[in-house]
Image (tube, rainbow, N blue to C red):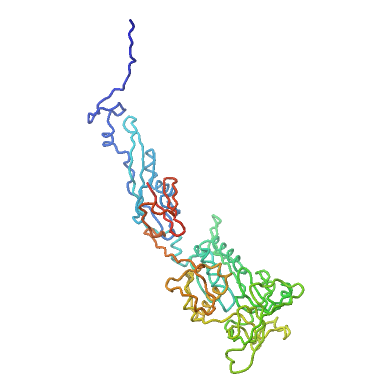
């Protein structure tokens, strides 16, 4: 007979806790976890409430000893910044995990949940979880102090244009707003001949200079002035000045080219009309519809000036208009404009209606003019032209009248204008009564020229109702498809910009939404008809 013996199973023995008497597994301290935590607090010495400085102007947090850093809410950078505030107490324990606890955006509180470990009582390792509360205190950084003082700058960009009309500056202002080139400026000051842009660093000023050179024909000079120096560390403090000069030509100016320049542009006539100023000067010959583009380098090599002041525009009435079908082109002629039509017109001044004096001229506005229409133009016969190129021209080569644009009822156009533009926040030295008239001219140019309108952000004015076009007199207007909605963005309590929040109870109620899940957060991406809203799920 054989005996079957089962293997002996050794189970660890239990001991009683020396404090409460609960059976526990043996450990170096011979005490249960509950009693151990009641006696030992490994988080002792770690502050449970810490203050952190935040600049509301530039949206940056203060990192000792003297650095301001940009951190998004609940980002890794902000978590590292919060842990550095308690770096010294944390060096005595082992940090296992750290994460943010959700708080209200307006509460000015940041909560971080920490998990730490430490060896206590004869080698026993105790783990503890607790929350550190960070109080966000507003404090203005040094850079924002200088901005608010408005008397500190290291670089200035001086933009000048020696002309009597500000159409180019109004166009340049809209380009700056569209591409956000004004965000780094400390101050924008408007003076008689242009604008001054003040910056806290030379790099921002150089970026502005490069932007202006790409948008309008300019030339510039750079200079710098020594403010202070340290001979021991070989450091110097300079103030830099960039002086930019824009070509003194605006839209609707009548110019006279030099014979050499006119010949190089395809043997076009010397008397031309400026139809647009962008990165180049766009000219058109009203006698042949020949067009030419002149860049900044060509202009400064062969300079020319405007023949007439914008206030010298006179109103004419069209007596007779005929379209020229066959355009004779000379050898080596340049490109012909396809957007304009050559016409021969007889016009008479509205101020001379009691006389029978009429003027004959050719114009590039043949597709717009009809008998009885009003048109604005320059009378070159009765005005005193002080230009070296005009004085050398033969009298038969100088036209009697140069027509610029068709005239409409300005009061009615202003009343029906249901759009608006944004303006730069700038300091004005003195306000001229003629500025409003020039600004209205610029708005009319936007309505008439689609090429300029493409580079400008136009916003719909909700205060003016949309009218039907049944009683339209033919004046050009901007369609609703070209307008943008003017969004009003409010600021939250921490100084950041946030949109109006929407409560999303059930995402399935909105089938047009797309959901993405990654890195423990849920992002609801709205379609084009809704605003973007981001929610964090824990």
Question: Number of numbered discs present?
Answer: 0
Does any portion of residue 495 appear in the rendered image?
yes
Where, by quadrant of the figure, is residue 282 drawn? bottom right
- Taking depth in this image into account, of 266 and 321 the one nearest to the observer is 321
Whether residue 392 sits left or right of residue 368 in the image: it is right
Displayed quadrant of residue 255: bottom right
Position of residue 28 relative to residue 509, above or below, is above
Q: Position of residue 345 (x, y in %)?
A: 65, 84
Q: Tell me the quadrant of the picture where the N terminus can be found.
A: top left
Q: Pinpoint residue 408: horizontal percent, then vertical percent.
A: 54, 81
Q: Position of residue 8 (x, y in %)?
A: 33, 16
The residue lying furthest to the right in this view is 331
Q: Nearer the viewer, residue 28 or 239?
A: 28
Q: Is residue 22 left or right of residue 255?
A: left
Which residue lies most toward the bottom here?
Answer: 354
Q: Where residue 128 sits in the image (x, y, percent)?
A: 33, 38
Q: Residue furthest left?
A: 20
User: Which residue lies most toward the top here?
Assistant: 1
Residue 459's place in the image compared with 438, above or below, is: above
Regarding residue 67, the answer to whether it shows in the image is no
Looking at this view, is 323 or 330 the one in front? 323
27 left or right of 233? left
Say if 91 sits above or below 466 in the image.
above
| Residue 2 image-quadrant placement | top left
């Amino acid at each position: 007979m054989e005996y079957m013996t089962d293997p002996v199973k050794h189970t660890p023995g239990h001991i009683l806790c020396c404090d409460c008497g609960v059976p526990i597994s043996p450990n170096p301290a011979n005490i249960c976890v509950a009693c151990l935590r009641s006696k030992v607090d490994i988080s002792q010495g770690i502050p449970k409430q810490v203050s952190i400085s935040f600049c509301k102007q530039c949206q940056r947090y203060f990192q000792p000893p003297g650095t301001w850093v940009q951190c998004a809410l609940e980002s890794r950078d902000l978590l590292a910044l919060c842990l550095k505030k308690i770096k010294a107490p944390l060096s005595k324990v082992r940090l296992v995990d750290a994460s943010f606890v959700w708080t209200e955006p307006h509460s000015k509180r940041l909560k971080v949940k920490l998990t730490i470990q430490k060896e206590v009582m004869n080698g026993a390792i105790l783990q503890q979880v607790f929350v550190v509360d960070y109080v966000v205190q507003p404090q203005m950084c040094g850079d924002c102090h200088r901005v608010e003082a408005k008397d500190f700058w290291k670089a200035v960009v001086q933009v000048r244009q020696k002309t009597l009309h500000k159409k180019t500056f109004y166009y340049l202002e809209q380009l700056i707003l569209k591409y956000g080139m004004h965000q780094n400026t400390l101050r924008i000051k408007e003076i008689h001949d242009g604008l001054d842009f003040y910056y806290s660093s030379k790099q921002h000023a150089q970026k502005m200079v490069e932007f202006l050179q790409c948008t309008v024909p300019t030339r510039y000079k750079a200079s710098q002035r020594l403010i202070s120096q340290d001979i021991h560390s070989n450091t110097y403090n300079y103030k830099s000045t960039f002086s930019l000069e824009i070509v003194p030509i605006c839209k609707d100016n009548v110019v006279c080219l030099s014979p050499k320049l006119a010949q190089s542009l395809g043997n076009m006539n010397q008397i031309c009309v400026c139809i647009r100023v962008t990165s180049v000067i766009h000219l058109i010959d009203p006698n042949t519809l020949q067009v030419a583009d002149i860049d900044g380098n060509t202009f400064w090599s062969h300079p020319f000036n405007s023949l007439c002041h914008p206030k010298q525009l006179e109103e004419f009435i069209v007596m007779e208009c005929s379209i020229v079908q066959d355009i004779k082109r000379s050898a080596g002629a340049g490109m012909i404009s396809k957007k304009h039509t050559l016409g021969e017109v007889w016009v008479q001044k509205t101020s001379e209606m009691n006389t029978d004096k009429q003027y004959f001229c050719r114009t590039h506005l043949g597709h717009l003019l009809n008998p009885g229409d009003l048109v604005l133009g320059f009378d070159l016969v009765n005005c005193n032209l002080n230009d070296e190129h005009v004085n050398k021209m033969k009298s038969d080569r100088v036209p009697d009248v140069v027509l610029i644009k068709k005239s409409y009822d300005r009061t009615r156009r202003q009343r029906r204008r249901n759009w608006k533009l944004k303006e730069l926040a700038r300091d004005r030295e003195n306000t001229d009564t003629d500025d409003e008239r020039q600004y209205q001219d610029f708005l009319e140019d936007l309505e008439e020229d689609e090429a300029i309108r493409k580079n400008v952000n136009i916003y719909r004015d909700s205060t003016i109702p949309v009218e039907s076009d049944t009683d339209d007199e033919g004046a050009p207007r901007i369609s609703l498809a070209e307008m943008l909605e003017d969004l009003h963005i409010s600021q939250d309590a921490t100084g950041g910009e946030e949109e109006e929040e929407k409560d999303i109870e059930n995402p399935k109620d909105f089938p047009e939404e797309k959901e993405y899940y990654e890195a423990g957060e849920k992002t609801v991406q709205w379609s084009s008809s809704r605003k973007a809203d981001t929610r964090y799920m824990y």
